[in-house]
Image: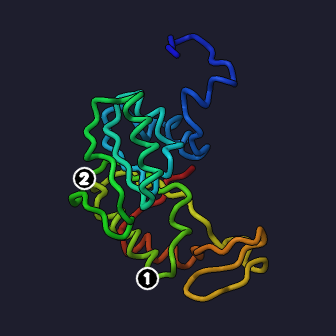
Amino acid sequence: MSYDRGMLLPPAELPEFFGLIDIYLFDQLLKGRLTPGMRILDAGSGAGRNLPYFLRHGFDVCAVDATPGALDQVRGLVAELAPRLPAANFRVEALDALSFPDQDFDAVIASAVLHFARDEPHFRAMLGELWRVLRPGGLFFARLASSIGIEARVQPLGGGRYHLPDGSDRFLVTEALLAGLAAALGGTRKAR
């Protein structure tokens, strides 16, 4: 599919152009916080649902996932949409043990992945690694599960993990944990 400015994309073609991008990540694009040329890491990329737009538009994309099959799918997307990117940008590795150098990325995307932490130390280890590879002043985009507003509807399992009303078990951040981490890391929240 080719795209010309001024051409309206029919709704059926939006997923081909943008992928199945997280709506809140799409919002960051609309606000100009992610721009071509940026080096970005999709941490816990899965099959690459958030990557098509970035691959098509001149971003220096890297992705990691602990599941080899997921990265095979990402590599297929890369071969089709951005074959110029080196294979070394796409790695099978855990988020708590990244092999990228310190301050390597303008933006780190952790969309719906941090809630898979085994416990609070594991969560902190993943967050620490993601923060380590982010450049000072960079954008850390995290969409994660929290207990905020549903405290009475979740059952604690220990270690920061909870049983949720949908039947799943997840690591949930609390408002206090988020505030403490932001202060400790020196991060600032941007308004949506």
Q: Which residue is mark 2?
A: 104
Q: Is residue 152 above or below residue 84?
A: below
Q: Which residue is at the far bottom? A: 158
How packed mark 2 is, by other alpha carbons closer than 10 Å (few <14, some 14-19, many 20 or more), is some
Q: Residue 31: where, in percent of width, then height?
A: 51, 37
Residue found at x 46% / y 57%: 44
Q: Is residue 52 above or below residue 123?
A: above
Q: Amino acid at mark 1?
A: Pro
Residue 121's disc is 1
Q: Residue 32: where, in percent of width, then height?
A: 45, 36
Is 187 on the left or on the right of 146, as rendered?
A: left
Near-viewer residue (64 or 111): 64
Q: Would you identify the image quadrant in which residue 86 lies? A: top left
Classify mark 1: helix, strand or loop. Answer: helix
Q: Residue 119: where, in percent of width, then height?
A: 51, 81
Q: Amino acid at mark 2?
A: Asp
Q: Is residue 32 above or below residue 156?
A: above
Q: Residue 114: where, in percent of width, then height?
A: 51, 66
Residue found at x 59% / y 39%: 20
Residue found at x 40% / y 33%: 55
Residue 69's disc is none
Separation of residues labelled 1 and 2 (CA atoms): 24 Å
How packed mark 1 is, by other alpha carbons closer than 10 Å (few <14, some 14-19, many 20 or more), is few
Labels 1 and 2: the sequence-earlier one: 2
Is 44 on the left or on the right of 175, as rendered?
A: left
Q: Would you identify the image quadrant in which residue 185 lies? A: bottom left
